[in-house]
Image (cartoon, rainbow, N blue to C red):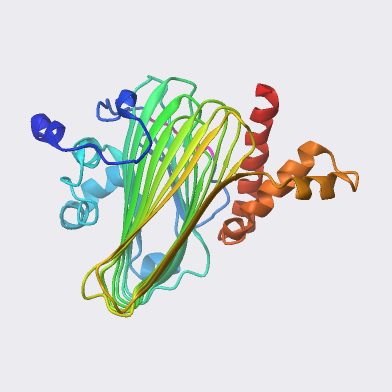
């Protein structure tokens, strides 16, 4: 049984300029709903859909199964591979990292487990879908663990949804290990609904000469704090953390994106784009850290926030912590309003103001949008942008 007192004694994670204590994310009652049919995945795609405690879709080609790829729910992995889970889960984000991570480690009862052996090459995208059923009003406490073996290559598309209109909370922790020489793209589209208050924590360990690129699209409708981090532990390790977020109505989304350059000749770049509407709040915190001994490393970050309402609040807070001389580092940040010249140019050619705003936002987020691993995922991001703008129209 988890030591509740020990968990509560740990500090809450820091999200500068975001007040979230009243959200009570350290007080969770895990939901236990099940389902029998898939909600989103139906077309023989390589991947898994976990809905509540149930696996509602699961498919891998025979070739991938023969190579030793493991893809299953956390519920099933606890039964089939308990020793492997005990060895791996909690090694990237430990149970003593902070109070919310510890609470997740102690209580998670659903999630996804992926193990890709060395040298396995995925020709297609691996889909991971997690659905919070929440009919009882209880909370999602989920863990996703992904191991990519040496010299393996995979593009992952992970989605999160709420299938309910009950007021609820969610805690999702994602751990990724990219072993020596692995090449990984981890894209996600998070879309919790307005009634779900969420804590999402993703972190990767990147080993020698491995590359892990995040394509992080946050389209939650409720309040959320989102952490994204890469530990560049091996020599020549690389990680690009690309983040887009869009807030509407009165919601708050707070981000902390961190890259730690620990190995020599490592490269970590943070690129964030946010759009804020109505009375919402969006805060980007970017942290690039190069530790002593990480010679020849490169840490860059750029955070831009576009305000489409005078009632909204946005912040972009870059931070560089450099403990080594032989490195390259830099940052840029801005918070501003939509370019009136762009709007005038588009509208002067017969485009309505509403369509012009959509085009400006798509262009603003275009660099991350273009890197989503499938055309369907790109279209899904466009659809989410349009949906959020519809919320703006309804609120005005």
- The number of numbered badges drawn on the structure is 0
Work out whether 145 lies above or below 141.
below
Question: Residue at 68% of width from left, 44% of height from top?
Answer: 338
Q: Tell me if residue 181 can be seen.
A: yes
Q: Quadrant of the C terminus?
A: top right
Q: Position of residue 263 (x, y in %)?
A: 26, 74
Q: Residue at x 34, y 23 (%)?
A: 138
Above or below, 169 relative to 17: above
Relative to 217, residue 148 above or below: below
Q: Quadrant of the N terminus?
A: top left
Relative to residue 131, is residue 365 drawn left or right? right
Q: Which residues are magenta?
A: 34-39
Q: Nearer the viewer, residue 69 or 365?
A: 365
Residue 308 relative to residue 139: left or right: right
Residue 174 located left or right of residue 41: left
Q: Give how far across and how far down residue 21 sits, in percent.
A: 30, 27
Asked whether 381 or 368 is in front, the reply is 368
Specify whether 187 is left or right of 336.
Answer: left
From where the camera sits, is residue 58 visible?
no
Q: Please provide percent x and percent y for residue 255.
A: 41, 44
Magenta stretch secondary structure, dominant: loop
Residue drawn at x 29%, y 29% as measured from the top left? 30
Q: 210 or 250: which is nearer to us?
A: 250
> In terms of depth relative to the viewer, which is nearer, 297 or 237?
297
Asked if residue 36 lies in the magenta stretch, the reply is yes
- Whether residue 215 is in magenta: the answer is no
Q: Residue at x 22, y 35 (%)?
A: 107
């Amino acid at each position: 049984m988890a030591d509740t007192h020990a968990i509560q004694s740990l500090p809450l994670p820091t999200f500068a300029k975001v007040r979230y204590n009243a959200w009570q994310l350290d007080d969770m009652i895990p939901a236990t709903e099940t389902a029998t049919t898939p909600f989103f995945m139906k077309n023989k795609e390589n991947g898994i859909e976990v809905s509540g405690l149930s696996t509602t879709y699961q498919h891998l080609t025979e070739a991938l199964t023969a190579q030793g790829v493991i893809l299953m729910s956390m519920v099933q992995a606890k039964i089939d591979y308990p020793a492997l889970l005990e060895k791996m889960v909690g090694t990237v984000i430990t149970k003593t990292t902070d109070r919310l991570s510890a609470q997740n480690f102690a209580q998670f009862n659903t999630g996804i487990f992926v193990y890709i052996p060395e040298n396995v090459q995925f020709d297609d995208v691996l889909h991971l879908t997690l659905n919070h059923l929440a009919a009882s009003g209880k909370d999602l406490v989920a863990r996703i663990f992904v191991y990519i073996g040496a010299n393996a290559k995979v593009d992952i598309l992970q989605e999160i949804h709420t299938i309910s209109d009950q007021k609820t909370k969610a805690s999702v922790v994602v751990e990724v290990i990219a072993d020596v020489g692995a090449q990984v793209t981890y894209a996600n589209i998070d879309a919790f609904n307005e009634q779900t208050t969420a804590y999402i924590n993703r972190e990767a360990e990147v080993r020698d000469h491995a590359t892990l690129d995040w394509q992080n699209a946050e389209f939650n409708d409720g309040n959320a704090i989102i952490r994204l981090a890469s530990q560049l532990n091996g020599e020549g390790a690389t990680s690009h953390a690309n983040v887009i977020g869009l807030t509407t109505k009165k919601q708050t989304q707070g981000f902390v994106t961190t890259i730690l350059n620990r190995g020599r000749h490592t490269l970590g770049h943070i690129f964030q784009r946010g759009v804020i509407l109505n009375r919402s709040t969006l805060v980007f915190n970017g942290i690039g850290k190069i530790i002593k001994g990480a010679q020849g490393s490169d840490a860059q970050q750029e955070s831009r926030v576009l305000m489409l309402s005078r009632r909204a609040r946005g912040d972009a807070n870059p931070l560089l912590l450099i403990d080594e001389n032989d490195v390259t580092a830099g940052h840029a940040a801005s918070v501003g309003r939509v370019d009136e010249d762009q709007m005038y140019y588009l509208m002067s050619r017969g485009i309505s103001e509403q369509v012009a705003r959509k085009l400006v936002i798509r262009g603003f987020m275009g660099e991350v949008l273009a890197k989503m691993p499938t055309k369907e995922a790109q279209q899904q991001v466009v659809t989410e942008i349009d949906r959020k703008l519809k919320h703006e129209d309804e609120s005005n």
